[in-house]
Amino acid sequence: MKRLIGVIMICLIAVVGCKKEKKYTVAREGLVNLISGDVVLVVNGAESKARIGDAIKEGMTIKTVGPKSIAEIYFGENAVKILGDTVIKIEKLITDISANTEESSFIVEKGRMFSRVTKKLSKGDSYQVKTPTAIAAVRGTDFLVTQEEDKSNVACLDGLLEVLNQSLATGQPVALEEKEEVDIVPGQDMVKKQISEDKLRMLNILLEIQAMREDIRKKYEQQKEEILKYVEEQKEANKTMLEEQREKDKALVEEQKARDKAMIEGIKGEIKDESGKAAQQSLDAAKSQMQDAKAVDKDQAISEAKDQMSAMKPKIEKQKIDLNQFKTQ
């Protein structure tokens, strides 16, 4: 019985595996909209001259050679302007189609990069610009990141962003609002300040971005359509895969139920057989005891009857005759 209870308890335990939702991502591309001076693209260590319309992909490095060289690149609706003598690495440029979010991450190894984030970021979207010491996380804004030797500067021209000093283990991010900037120095707390009017006028002129060219816009729209098509195809594939998996899971559950039922029935049969044998043995023992008791009672009854009969028999004593009285004197 204990064995049966144990098996039933095991069969009643439902082990639910929490499946982490699979992440489906597709690479996005930026498109070069404007080049002035000497701009170089680096892919796997190989350098090539940048041209208008070139695709900018995750993992690439962009170099502007000379103080007057400039490159403007559109990443969808957002744009960046890379100023002279600057090295930028494209760290991440993906769309997560399972969550419908976008991730963009750039590293300013040296020089200056201006970002114009015009697309309103949704929950889960990420747009970051990093330096060796700072991370600027954006929630929709225009801002300039500068890296010079061991010091960084982040200047917010419009909107809102957060800046973190990576060299401080317990440091808290500083929120920058319109016309505010902060220097980031390793090991030092950040103190934000107002951008001077002179510097602000200079930045507004310097950081003006040219409108997206028509040919670049067409490429962008084509890329957008391809991503949307991929998203729909992936959704349909996921739906089919999910339905197939459900059918497989259902079949596995039914098979497991059948195995559990057969196992339980088998154990029940074993227990029934064992119980039957034990019951038969007990019955045989009881019958034997009854037979023994009957035999004992019968013998005892016969003995008692004999004793009683013996006791009831009349005792007749034979009269003794003295023969001497008949002799002749």
Image: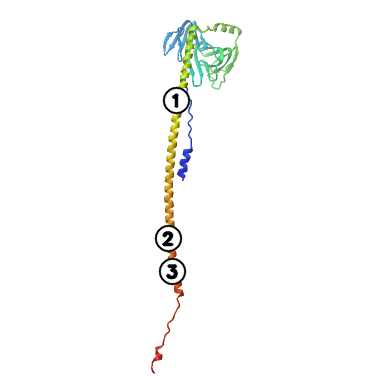
Q: How far apart are marks 3 and 2 (CA)?
A: 18 Å
Residue shown at 46%/42% (left/top)?
A: 6
Q: Position of residue 152 (x, y in %)?
A: 53, 13
Mark 1 near mark 2, Cβ–Cβ under 8 Å?
no
**Amino acid type for the residue under numbered disc 2:** Gln
> 199 or 138: which is nearer to us?
138
In the figure, 26 relative to 7: above or below?
Answer: above
Q: What element carries label 3?
A: helix
Q: How far apart are marks 1 and 2 (CA)?
A: 74 Å
Residue shown at 45%/31% (left/top)?
A: 249
On the question of residue 245 being in view, the answer is: yes
- Can you identify the residue that label 3 sits on? 303
Q: What element carries label 1?
A: helix
* Disc 2 crowd, CA 10 A, few/some/many (<14, 14-19, 20+): few
Q: Where is residue 127 in the image (x, y as percent from the top left)?
A: 52, 16
Q: Is residue 185 left or right of residue 56?
A: right
Looking at marks 1 and 2 on the same chain, the residue that comes earlier in the sequence is marked by 1
Q: Where is residue 318 in the image (x, y as percent from the top left)?
A: 42, 82
- Can you identify the residue that label 1 sits on? 241
Q: Distance between the residues labelled 1 and 3?
A: 92 Å
Q: What element carries label 2?
A: helix
Looking at marks 3 and 2 on the same chain, the residue that comes earlier in the sequence is marked by 2
Q: Where is residue 325 in the image (x, y as percent from the top left)?
A: 41, 91
**Amino acid type for the residue under numbered disc 1:** Met
